[in-house]
Structures are given as structure tokens and as C-alpha cells.
Amino acid sequence: MAAPPRRARVEDVHELALRMPHVTVERGTGGNPIYQVGGRSFVFFRNPRPDAVDPETGERYRDVIVIWVPSEADKQALVQDPESPFFTTPHFNGHPSVLVRASRIGDLSCQELVEVIEDAWLSRASRARRAAWLAAQQRQAPGDG
């Protein structure tokens, strides 16, 4: 019997984002990391905001990670799945990203997190960088297949 897949950790978010080519790290107002490719964010650790709060206590979530997605369809697939830790808020209506609390990142397997981070990078990288990376991986971009 195969061992169950390892669950994702917050450290994996950082490692996976940094593993992608041409990534730079900026710092947000609270010192939170913002991972960018070509000056375009694809993953960032968000400061507490009034739109993401605990429904029982009203306290702002302090551990929200924003991850870009390739399309609105991808976003909806992630946030509408009742088993998914991903969510959105009205503030992000029309924005190609999903939110996930760091405290729930373990709901994902490492492989699931790899796919989400790679897709985030692909959605923000330039056409040339995307094509070079995909060629090296022998893959197609999401939606190109």
C-alpha cells in the first residue's frame, strides 16, 4: 500500500514560488513576501484586511495568501469545491486570484500546491518566459491543450 501524499506546508509555498524562474521577492507594507515574475505578482502573503474575517468572531484573518489563477473558470472551480480550502471575497470579484489561509494549506497535497503555484506563475509570466519554461517541462499552458 502506498503512503498517502505529503500534505503541503506554508514553507512549501515559499519554496515553490522561489523555484520558478525569474522570480523576485518584494515586501508588502507589513513586510510580507510578494513573489513576482517580470514585476507581476503571482503569490503574496496578505496583510489582515476587513474583507477576510472569521465569521464567528469578526477577527481579520492574519494568514491569507493570494494566488493568481489562469482564468475565472479556474477560480470558480477552486472556490466552489466544498472540499477546497480556497475562497474569495467580494473585494476579489473579477480578479484572477483565489485566497487560502495558511492555516488550511495542509488541506492540499504537495502535488496540488505545486500545480496551483506553477499555474499562478504561468498566468503572470511573459509569453516568452512561459514558452521557455513549458518547453523545458514539455507541457502546455493551462487552457492551451
Image (tube, rainbow, N blue to C red):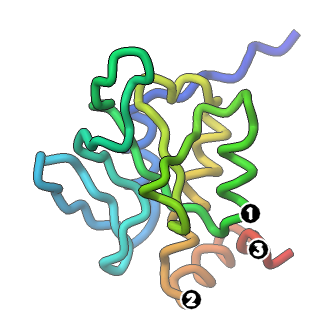
Rendering quarter of residue 2: top right
Q: Which residue is mark 3?
A: 140
Mark 1 in CB contact with mark 3 (< 8 angstroms): no
- As helix, strand or loop, the secondary structure at mark 3 comes to loop
- As helix, strand or loop, the secondary structure at mark 2 comes to helix
At which x and y percent is residue 124? 49, 74
At which x and y percent is residue 119? 61, 61
Q: Which residue is mark 2?
A: 127
Instruction: Please name the amino acid that badge 2 sits on.
Output: Arg
Residue at screen point 71% across, 73% down: 141
Label 1: how many Cα within 10 Å (few below 14, some 14–19, many 20+): few
Q: Quadrant of the C terminus?
A: bottom right
Residue at screen point 51% across, 29% down: 105
Q: In the displayed structure, does residue 118 sit left or right of residue 22?
A: right
Q: Which residue is mark 1?
A: 73
Instruction: Please name the amino acid that badge 3 sits on.
Output: Gln
Q: How far apart are labels 2 and 3 at the CA level?
A: 12 Å
Q: How far apart are labels 2 and 1 at the CA level?
A: 21 Å
Label 2: how many Cα within 10 Å (few below 14, some 14–19, many 20+): few
Question: Which one is earlier in the sequence, the residue at label 2 or at label 1?
Answer: 1
- Of residues 22 and 31, the one nearer the viewer is 31
Rendering quarter of residue 112: top right
- Of residues 3 and 98, the one nearer the viewer is 98
- As helix, strand or loop, the secondary structure at mark 1 comes to helix
For discs 1 and 3, the disc positioned in front in the rendered view: 1
Q: Is residue 10 above or below residue 124?
A: above
Residue at screen point 12% across, 46% down: 30
- Of residues 52 and 98, the one nearer the viewer is 52
For this orientation, the residue located farthest to the bottom is: 128
Q: In the displayed structure, does residue 28 sit left or right of residue 6?
A: left
Instruction: Please name the amino acid that badge 1 sits on.
Output: Ala
